[in-house]
Image (cartoon, helix red, strand yellow):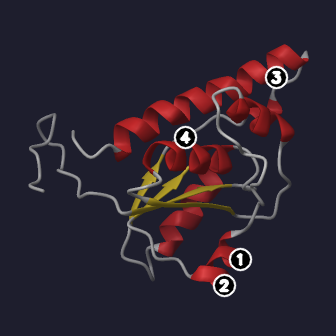
Amino acid sequence: MADHPPPFPGDVPRRKVQSVLFVCAHNSVRSPMAEALARHYFGKSIYVQSAGIRAGERDAFAVAALDEVGIDGSRHKPRTLAELEEWEGLNFDLVISLSPEAHHAALELTRTLACDVEYWPTADPTIVQGSRDQIMDAYRDTRDGLSFRIRMRLRSEP
């Protein structure tokens, strides 16, 4: 497949992504949502994983937000970057960080990995307080924002 010209002057044409890693703080909300969404849309053509800087717990609101769009997130088991590296190694074309702390860790990975790193600042819906509906709205916003960015970034045609 030939590279397409960049959509805007000054943009660098991007190579096709074959594997992507989403990283956030605890691998319990943002990065597992991104992993599930990317697998849903591109799982047959792109290898997708997620990890956190520190160990976290599966988040029931994240699972519920994914369930609303027909994606099962209930089997996700949070893991750290260190665990992922130990189990299968870190060999990704693209690492997408979703929090400032995760971005710092992703940049550190480039010392030993030849990968592209992108920072997608993504609000943490766990900090929202209020009714269940207000909390779910925050999770939906995170899910929908990630869904849009993932589809735009990982699609094969510009």
Name the residue: 36% across, 36% down.
Answer: 152
Whether the residues at callouts 4 and 1 have beta carbons within 8 Å, the answer is no
Q: Secondary structure at mark 1?
A: helix
Residue on which the image places disc 2: 86
Query: As shown in the figure, which amino acid type bears the numbered disc 4?
Result: Pro
Identify the image quadrant of residue 10: top left
| Badge 4 or badge 1: first in the primary sequence | 1
Mark earlier in primary sequence (3, 2): 2
Residue farthest to the right, as pictured: 131
Q: What residue is rendered at 63% in x and 28% in y? A: 69
Q: Nearer the viewer, residue 32 or 134?
A: 32
Q: Position of residue 32 (x, y in %)?
A: 67, 50
Q: Is residue 16 visible?
A: yes
Q: CA distance from mark 3 to mark 4?
A: 19 Å
Indicate which disc, 1 or 3, sits on the residue closer to the N terminus: 1
Q: Which residue is mark 3?
A: 135
CA gap between label 1 and label 2 equals: 5 Å
- What secondary structure is found at the residue carrying circle 4? loop
Residue 111 percent across, percent down from the top left: 45, 79
Residue 121 badge? 4
Question: Which residue position is annotated with label 1?
Answer: 83
Q: Please tell me whether mark 4 or mark 1 is closer to you in this view.
A: 1
Cβ–Cβ below 8 Å for labels 1 and 2?
Answer: yes
Q: Quadrant of the N terminus?
A: bottom left
CA distance separating discs 4 and 2: 27 Å
Residue at 77% x, 39% y: name it: 63
| Quadrant in the rendering for residue 51 | bottom right
- Kindly identify the amino acid type of the residue bearing the numbered disc 1: Glu
- The correct choice, above or below, for 75 with respect to 106 in the image is above
